[in-house]
Image: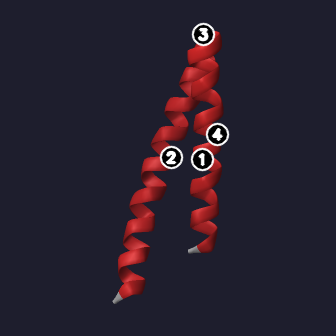
Amino acid sequence: MKELVNKINANIELFKTNAEAQVVKGNKAAGARARKAALELMKDLKEFRKVSVAESK
């Protein structure tokens, strides 16, 4: 579970970096990278929820 939390934190940082580059600098490629990171983040968060619920039982 600790690895999953670290992966989520890494994806959050990646998303923040690329989203800021898109908004501030108008970098279109960074927008694509931010969207990709957001998709990965959603998958990881769903997995975290499954693991968290399983461990609490």
Q: Earlier in the sequence, mark 1 or mark 3?
A: 1
Q: Amino acid at mark 4?
A: Leu
Q: Which residue is mark 1?
A: 11
| Label whose residue precedes the other's in the sequence (1 or 2) | 1
Q: Are marks 1 and 2 in contact (CB under 8 Å)?
A: yes
Q: CA distance from mark 3 to mark 4?
A: 17 Å
For the C terminus, which image quadrant?
bottom left
Q: Residue at x 65, y 32 (%)?
A: 17
**50 in relation to 14, above or below:** below
**Front tag of 2 and 4:** 4
> Which of the two labelled residues, at mark 2 and mark 3, occupies the earlier sequence position?
3
Query: Disc 1 marks which amino acid?
Result: Asn
Quarter placement of the N terminus? bottom right
- Name the residue rendered at 61%, 73% in the picture: 2
Q: Dividing the picture into quarters, in which one does residue 3 lie?
A: bottom right
Mark 1 → mark 3, Cα distance in angstroms: 21 Å
Task: Tell me if label 2 and label 4 are in contact, CB under 8 Å.
Answer: no
Circle 4 residue: 14
Which residue position is annotated with label 2?
40
Secondary structure at badge 4 equals helix
Kindly identify which numbered label has been placed on residue 26.
3
Are there few (<14), some (14-19), or many (20+) residues within 10 Å of tag 2?
Answer: some
Marks 2/4: CA–CA distance: 11 Å
Tell me whether the residue at label 4 lies in contact with that at label 1, contact meaning CB atoms closer than 8 angstroms: yes
Q: Quadrant of residue 15?
A: top right
Where residue 14 sits: x, y (%)?
64, 39
**Amino acid on which the number 2 mark rests in the picture:** Glu
